[in-house]
Amino acid sequence: VQVIRLIWSGQRGVRFQGKHYQLRGAHTGPVPAHLMEIWIGGNKPRMLSLIGRLADGWIPSSPYVPPDQLIEKNDRINEAALKAGRDPAKIRRIYNVMGEITSGDRRGYLEGPVEYWVEELNRLVEKCRMDSFIFGPKGSSEEQMRLFAEEVVPQVRD
């Protein structure tokens, strides 16, 4: 993460001496046209600590980090951020949610009607401290994306 930030800095003759990476007079490419945040999707203790110390965001996926693990993992990120002198609130929490918006009853986690999705995403914001979502639809992508954008998102933003 530190090396990437240095490479994006636009400095010439960049030097870095780390445990695994060293730069000795590296010439960087063009500076990004806008702020480039570094979001990391790791979920093991060492990666969560790294996220707290250095990253701009945490981006886990629902199949790999179920909701019942989010609070504990967020706590580890927050502890590492505080130890590093960072404000944990400045670290984005983006949850990749995979599922299907259906017209019938709820069939499983993130498989159900719009009302269920709204309730669950609001719970993830309030209880699990997630602040954004990326939707990965299981069904017909175009219709699923329309439902998510037009019917779910406006009710979660409030």
Image (cartoon, helix red, strand yellow):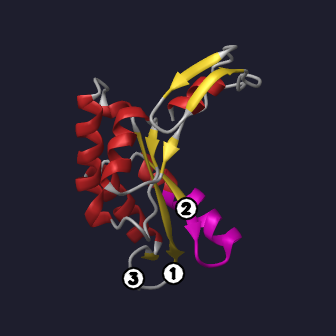
91 and 142: which one is in front? 91
56 and 67: which one is in front? 56
Residue at 63%, 64% in the rendered image: 145
Name the residue carrying label 1. Answer: 103
- Quadrant occupied by the C terminus: top left
Name the residue carrying label 2. Answer: 135
Q: Position of residue 141 (x, y in %)?
A: 67, 71
Name the residue carrying label 3. Answer: 108
Stretch in magenta:
136-152
Q: Is residue 103 left or right of residue 129?
A: right
> The residue tagged with tag 1: helix, strand or loop?
loop
Q: Residue 109's quadrant in the figure? A: bottom left
> The residue tagged with tag 2: helix, strand or loop?
strand
Q: Is residue 126 left or right of residue 18?
A: left
Outermost right residue:
30
- Relative to residue 103, is residue 50 depicted above or below? above
- Relative to residue 33, is residue 95 depicted above or below? below
The three-letter code of the residue at mark 3 reads Gly
